[in-house]
Amino acid sequence: MPREIGKKLVAQNKKARHEYQLGDVYEAGLVLTGTEVKTLRRGRATIAEAYATVDDHGEAWLINANIPEYEFGTWRNHSAKRSRKLLLHRQEITKLARALDNSGRTLVPLSIYFKDGYAKVEIAVATGKKDWDKRRDLAERDAKREAERALAVRNRYNRS
């Protein structure tokens, strides 16, 4: 069977863009078992409560990501919320560890997807937003939407 080509989105953390101020974004591979891959190919995963970390040994881990058990699996099925190792270059792991040393920073997974047949996770260095930051972002988005509507109405009547 030929390898898949392109990008297939499995799970997305939409709340992350609202809850956090995102910094550098990295693409990392995932170390998975066979039943985890089968579950991901069916499009079943949740990363809403997940986060990533770099341990003392210089390894990056995805923690608390929920990949449900494969329903047709046997006794060798995986556990749903186990920690999964992230595959990154050494320089990237060093940058992430340095960025996490600053207080108030965390690694947030943005999405899990298949890229050319390989499972990948997109992670970002993030800082938590305050409530007033969230309100300001919503107000800016609403103002931008209102301006676009006004321009569309104006352009619609000026054509004739």
Image (spheres, helix red, strand yellow):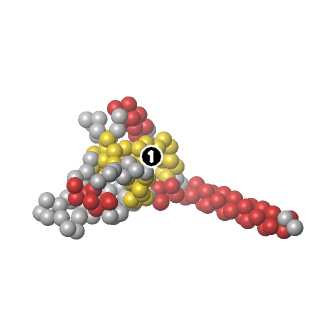
The quadrant holding residue 45 is bottom left
The N terminus: image quadrant: bottom left
Tell me which residue sits at (47%, 56%) in the image. Answer: 16
Mark 1 Cα shell of 10 Å, populated few (<14), some (14-19), many (≥20): many
Tell me where residue 109 appears, x and y as whole percent.
40, 51
Tell me which residue sits at (34%, 45%) in the image. Answer: 29
Tell me where residue 25 appears, x and y as whole percent.
46, 43
Q: Please tell me whether mark 1 sits on a helix, a strand or a loop.
A: strand
Outermost residue toward the front? Answer: 1
Q: Which residue is nearer to you in this view: 35 or 19?
A: 35
The C terminus: image quadrant: bottom right
Circle count: 1
Tell me which residue sits at (64%, 59%) in the image. Answer: 141
Q: Which residue is nearer to you in this view: 71 or 25?
A: 71
Image height check: is 43 above or below 27? below
Tell me which residue sits at (69%, 59%) in the image. Answer: 144
Tell me where residue 27 appears, x and y as whole percent.
41, 44
Can residue 156 be seen?
yes
The quadrant holding residue 151 is bottom right
Tell me where residue 126 appears, x and y as whole percent.
46, 47
Q: Which residue is nearer to you in this view: 103 or 86?
A: 86
Identified by mark 1, the residue type is Ala
Can residue 132 be seen?
no
Answer with left or right where residue 146 lies relative to residue 80: right
Residue designated by label 1? 124
The quadrant holding residue 111 is bottom left
Outermost residue toward the left? Answer: 75
Answer with left or right where residue 117 lies relative to residue 15: left
